[in-house]
Amino acid sequence: MKKVLGLLVAVILIMSFSGCLQGSKPPTKETILQAIDSVDTYTYEKKMIMRYPSLTRVVYIYSGINRQEKQFFELLEINATYSNGQFQRTKMLQYFDGSKNYVKMETNENGKETSGAWAFTINDIYRAYEQYYPDLPRDQVLNKFIESRDEILNVKDLLSKANITEITKKGDRYEIKFVLYRQYISTPSILQSYPGNASEVQEYMNVMRKLVRESIAGVLLVDKDGKPLLLKMKSNAKITYLYSNETIDATGDYMIKFSYEYNPPKWAEELKRIKK
């Protein structure tokens, strides 16, 4: 009997130890991408410092996404300081509850302050898109509208193209170092412009369309399941504006923190008082 019990204990210990070993395997690029796809709700905090020859722009975003319910809230702050001493500050609050998008904006340009508040229905969003993508189905319009704020999708796209150089275990987390070179055409999103004059928006998009050649070095911290917790990156880029054929150098520092919950702040509900 003692031999049987001893054997049983040994089997249990071996199974437990085997399970610990299996659970301690470092994540791969594939498991991280799968973990990102499995996320339903999350909140992120993002800070960017971008430096251009005559401009430094500091961007802060606090946002939450509910993918399943197709909802989001977003606080956006932009501080732009120019080499000639001019400045521009913008603060925007948004809340999309699945049926309406509530927006409040305040700007300060060299001491001149302006503000406004709007409430856009889904039909307003559809009409804005129809000016540019008349054949895009309405369900895809709404998906694109939500995805434009879905920051973790940007992490997925970034990581899928990056070369991982090192994976290090940090307690119950993993630190992934990566590098990436990418080249792409960047065009301002119409999502920041609806509803508006289509010709003016199109002209702005044409003028701001640019070729970006960018080198990135980053560190991504993930949990034991591969879900992103913290991303830090440094970027060096050459930007060519296609309209004017002007090329400038730019550098950027980025930090994004993720938590996996969705709790709209008090100000998001207060935005619902805005009347169209």
Image (spheres, helix red, strand yellow):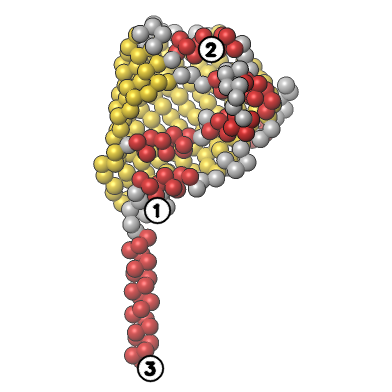
Callout 1 amino acid: Lys
User: Where 184 sits versus 231, above or below?
Assistant: above
Q: Position of residue 120 (x, y in %)?
A: 67, 24
Q: Position of residue 173 (x, y in %)?
A: 37, 51
Q: Which numbered disc, 2 or 3, marks the residue closer to the eye?
A: 2
Q: Which numbered disc, 2 or 1, marks the residue closer to the eye?
A: 2
Residue that extends furthest to the front in the rendered view of this protein:
135
SS label for mark 2: helix
Q: CA distance from mark 3 to mark 1?
A: 40 Å
User: Where 251 sits versus 247, above or below?
Assistant: below
- 4 relative to 140 in the view: left or right: left
Q: Nearer the viewer, residue 127 or 191?
A: 127
Q: Position of residue 183 (x, y in %)?
A: 34, 24
Tell me the tag on residue 1: 3
SS label for mark 1: loop
Marked residue nearer the N-terminal end (2 or 3): 3
The residue at the point 33 percent across, 28 percent down is 182
Marked residue nearer the N-terminal end (3 or 1): 3
User: Where 94 sits versus 195, above or below?
Assistant: below
Q: Residues within 10 Å of mark 1 (few under 14, many from 20)?
A: some
Give the residue number, with chain letter if any, for mark 1: 224
The residue at the point 34 percent across, 59 percent down is 24
Q: Quadrant of the C terminus?
A: top right
Q: Position of residue 172 (x, y in %)?
A: 37, 54
Give the residue number, with chain letter if any, for mark 2: 202
